[in-house]
Image (cartoon, coloured by chain):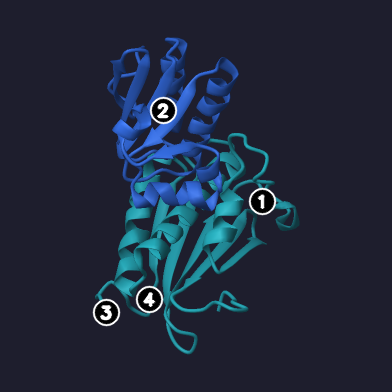
Amino acid sequence: MSRLVTDKPVKVSIFSTPQHLCAVRAVADALCRALGFDEQSTTHVVLSLDEALTNVIRHAYGGAEDQPIEVELAALGAPRGPGLRICIRDRGRSVDPSLIRSRDLEDVRPGGLGVHIMNECMDFVEYRSAPGGGTVLTLVKRLGPAEGDTAE
Amino acid sequence: MSAESQDSPVRQVRWIGRAAVVDVEGDIDLSRSTRFQQSLLEVMDRQPERIVVNLTDVGYMDSSGVASLVKLLSRARRQGVTLRLSGLRARVRSIFEITRLDSVFEICATEEEALA
């Protein structure tokens, strides 16, 4: 397994500018490959992370480009097999997690697809209000079967 | 500003009769999707009979890029213009499948097929 995979998470701090999205995608892509994810799973993780960050920029920060976003990517090991956990912390406007849901895909119109993509591509998606304001979004992708997955 | 301007993901627009073939390059994410949409709608303003969006050189697209294409599709349908996408790489095709838009867009393997 690659030296990129250790028991310590990779931490990336960015500003809420869309110009930084490609850098975070590159980190996630490299980590997925190091963990042994196949092409499809890697695509799903990278896309979900991108959509999550896009939502933070657009909704939590209302498009402001100078606000902090912290991304933590941690390799998951035994006992449930290899996987990747991503935590995204913003300090923007909090949204009631119970109100975050994907929209009807039959309604073909621009926008509003990010939550659907995350739910479809990841094994675990959880929004939590963060102490001190903002939101922590946790995404988990397992290498193997993901029945009844949790963030642990 | 023309569709083929330097900062646009649209590299060039080639006209084959009344069909516009739009060559796109690079990643399309939130940092470029607004310009992408603007460029696409500029092509529509030139009143083609058909638009082929050639995505061969696009390595990545997120939902903001897809939203630009949905907007173009909506306008194309209103104006009776045929819109086809061609040359999607696996990673780009994925987002159309995940959002089930692969059954909404006409997706062709090659530009030749899209122009046929």
Q: What residue type is labelled 2?
A: Phe
The hue used for chain A is cyan
* Residue of label 1: A102
Gap in Å between the C-alphas at discs 2 and 4? 39 Å
Q: Residues within 10 Å of mark 1 (few under 14, many from 20)?
A: some
* Residue of label 3: A1
- Give whichever of discs 1 and 3 has the lower sequence position: 3
| In-image side of A117 versus A96 (left or right) | left
The hue used for chain B is blue
Q: Look at discs 2 and 4 and give the one toward the viewer.
A: 2
Residue visible at 42% across and 66% down?
Answer: A73
In the structure shown, which secondary structural element does the residue marked by tag 1 occupy?
A: loop
* Residue of label 4: A8
**Contact, CB < 8 Å: mark 3 with mark 4?**
no
Please, which chain is the residue tagged with disc 1 on?
A
Query: In which quadrant of the rendered image does the C terminus of chain B lie?
Result: top left
Residue visible at 48% across and 24% down?
Answer: B82
| In-image side of A136 versus B40 (left or right) | right
In the structure shown, which secondary structural element does the residue marked by tag 2 occupy?
A: helix
Query: Image quarter for residue A29?
Result: bottom left
Residue visible at 62% across and 53% down?
Answer: A134
* Image coordinates for residue B78, horizontal then vertical, percent: 60, 19
**Is residue B110 shown to the viewer in this render?**
yes
Please, which chain is the residue tagged with disc 4 on?
A
**Contact, CB < 8 Å: mark 3 with mark 2?**
no
Q: How many labels does the image show?
A: 4
Q: Look at discs 3 and 2 and give the one toward the viewer.
A: 2
Q: Look at discs 4 and 1 and give the one toward the viewer.
A: 1
Gap in Å between the C-alphas at discs 3 and 4? 15 Å
Q: Which amino acid does label 3 sit on?
A: Met
**Contact, CB < 8 Å: mark 4 with mark 1?**
no
* Residue of label 2: B36
